[in-house]
Image (cartoon, grey):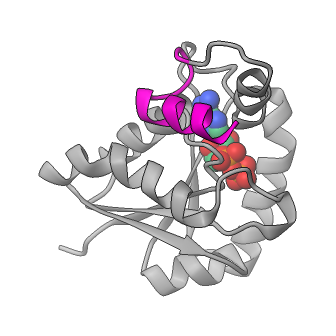
Amino acid sequence: MTQRTALYPGTFDPMTLGHLDIMKRASRLCDKLVIAVAINRDKKPLFDLDERVEMVEHVVAPFREYIDVEVKPFEGLLIHFVEQCGASMIVRGLRAVSDFEYEFQMAGMNDRLNPDIETVFLMADPRYQTIASRLVKEIARLGGDVSQFVTPEVEQRLKDKL
Ligand code: ADP
């Protein structure tokens, strides 16, 4: 049987409990999960690429007991990276209507570029529905408590950084 590889791309600046939930659920849909950490120079991330990869590596370590997981940085056209990784699906999390338009367009364009690659949307868990990396950074910067949005490891990294 062919191995089913899924790729979950994101900036993960920083990784939140919402991302973690999508990773967990995606890991049940495939034989191999590639988490693609976007270099994303334009977004000027707070955490550099190595830090963002480390944060993801930290949480996915336990998944390796039951699934093949790789955490890889990427730059350039997503669909090319998906092809390079031999993945057949792109996983995205969908929070609210605000995510929809952008994600709908992206999925449509990617489908035109390579119709063999399917974009799979996982609805955000209601517990994590409102969590966004951008807001987590803002709350942390202003001295707020972000412990209900991120792992203790990420919380510590935010404290050290800000
Ligand atoms: P990007 O720069 O690709 O938007 P993000 O790291 O912000 O990168 O998000 C990566 C993916 O995770 C996107 O599909 C996004 O919709 C999803 N996501 C982000 N936050 C959550 C959350 N709280 N619950 C579910 N999915 C989420």
> Seen in the image, is 47 located left or right of residue 66?
right
Quick check: 72 above or below 67? below
Residue that appears at 53% across and 29% down: 155
Quadrant assignment for the C terminus: top right
Quick check: 146 above or below 155? above
- The magenta stretch is 147-162
Residue that appears at 30% across and 44% down: 28
Q: How many marks?
A: 0
Queried whether the magenta region covers residue 21, the answer comes back as no
> Where residue 90 appears, x then y in whole percent?
55, 60
> Seen in the image, is 42 located left or right of residue 134?
right
Quadrant assignment for the N terminus: bottom left
> Where residue 49 appears, x then y in whole percent?
60, 65
Queried whether the magenta region covers residue 156, the answer comes back as yes
Residue closest to the eye, 77 or 41: 41
Magenta span: chief secondary structure: helix
Quarter of the rendered image showing ligand 1: top right
Occupied quadrant, residue 153: top left
**Is any part of residue 55 visible from this angle?**
yes
Residue that appears at 84% across and 56% down: 105
**Is any part of residue 93 visible from this angle?**
no
> Where residue 103 appears, x then y in whole percent?
77, 49
Quick check: 91 above or below 115? above
> Where residue 85 appears, x then y in whole percent?
45, 80
